[in-house]
Image: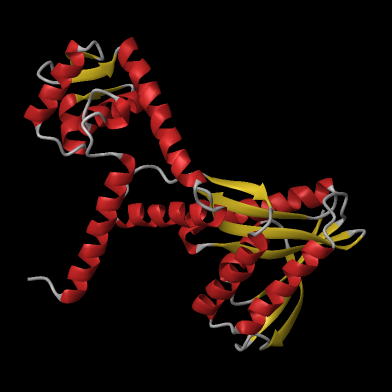
Amino acid sequence: MIDDRIARRAAAIRRFNRLYTQRIGILEEGYLDTDYPLAAVRLVFELGDRGEAIAADLARELNLDPGYLSRLVNRLRRDGMLDRRPAPRDRRQSVLSLTDRGREVFEMVNRRSQDDIGSLLTSMPEADQRRLVEALGVAGRLLGDVYPAPVVVLREHRPGDMGWVVQAHGALYADEFGWDERFEALVAEITAGFLRAFDPARERCWIAERDGSPVGCVFVVRQDDGVAKLRLLLVDPSARSGGLGRTLVRECIRFARAAGYRRLVLWTNDVLAGARRIYEAEGFSITDQTPHADFGKPMVGELWELAL
């Protein structure tokens, strides 16, 4: 017997499964308004994405009984949807691919699925959309998602982003370094000042997004006519393995040069080893060091500079 804690969590997952299958119509015979059940439409999706595949591989990856898969393949072949040919290296194996008719159906159901999910999302506020996508990404990773990691894209700031910047900095630095609320207050002051005096020709904020949810940020702000300041570099722990921090710093350098600044400076602390490695690799050098305990922990503040 499982304990009560696991039972409650299992019930929560089952409740979500029932809700989601009902919302997207998985249990309906004519999935996505086709004449086929979910398993057949999934087969069309897989072949549409891959181009072709070995039947035995599909049975294993989709967790389908080989006999059931064979019946689905025969039905789709009768309907002119699939081609089947012997595998070149092992003629006992079958290679499956879509016909022109199958490709038309794939494009139709792919578009219909996209529209259905799009309608579901547009019924939610922007913040809820981001929370949902991020939560599903976390669920996929915890359940062993083996598909390629989603692409991280950079964009300029928009309304609502500064709240995330403040919250993310406050939570992350408290968790990883034990910094107190004074650091979160400092970030709030920086972001408020950025918005009040924003000069789009000489200042910029980049938000890094993955699946529509923010996972990083950095700012370039004007210090004076010849000097720009890099501020508030942050990368969420879930996005740190792909070089996002270096990408953000390089974007700051590129922008500062294009805007006509002669120097790019920044302030950081000696405990931020990952960020310091990036700054050093990109050519910054330390110009000053000052011990302090401004955020409740003893550390050394550092000024870094890059000639542009």
Residue 38, image quadrant = top left
As drawn, 43 above or below 135:
above
As drawn, 167 above or below 160:
below
Q: Which residue is located at x 33 percent, y 45 percent?
A: 23
Which is nearer the eye, 66 or 36?
Answer: 36
Which of the image's four quarters has the N terminus?
bottom left
Q: How many marks?
A: 0
**Colouring chosen for the image of the structure:** secondary structure
Q: Which residue is located at x 17 percent, y 25 percent?
A: 55
Could you tell me residue 118's position as x and y percent?
Answer: 47, 39
Could you tell me residue 49's position as x and y percent?
Answer: 36, 27
Which is nearer the eye, 124 or 92?
Answer: 124
Residue 15 lies left or right of residue 4; in this view the side is right
As drawn, 268 above or below 54:
below
Whether residue 75 is visible here, answered yes or no, is yes
Residue 127 lies left or right of residue 99; in this view the side is right
Residue 145 lies left or right of residue 14; in this view the side is right
Whether residue 87 is visible here, answered yes or no, is no
Residue at the farthest right position: 225
Could you tell me residue 16's position as x and y percent?
Answer: 29, 56
Residue 27, image quadrant = top left
Could you tell me residue 11's position as x and y percent?
Answer: 21, 64
Q: Which residue is located at x 22 percent, y 70 percent?
A: 8
Q: Which residue is located at x 17 percent, y 69 percent?
A: 7
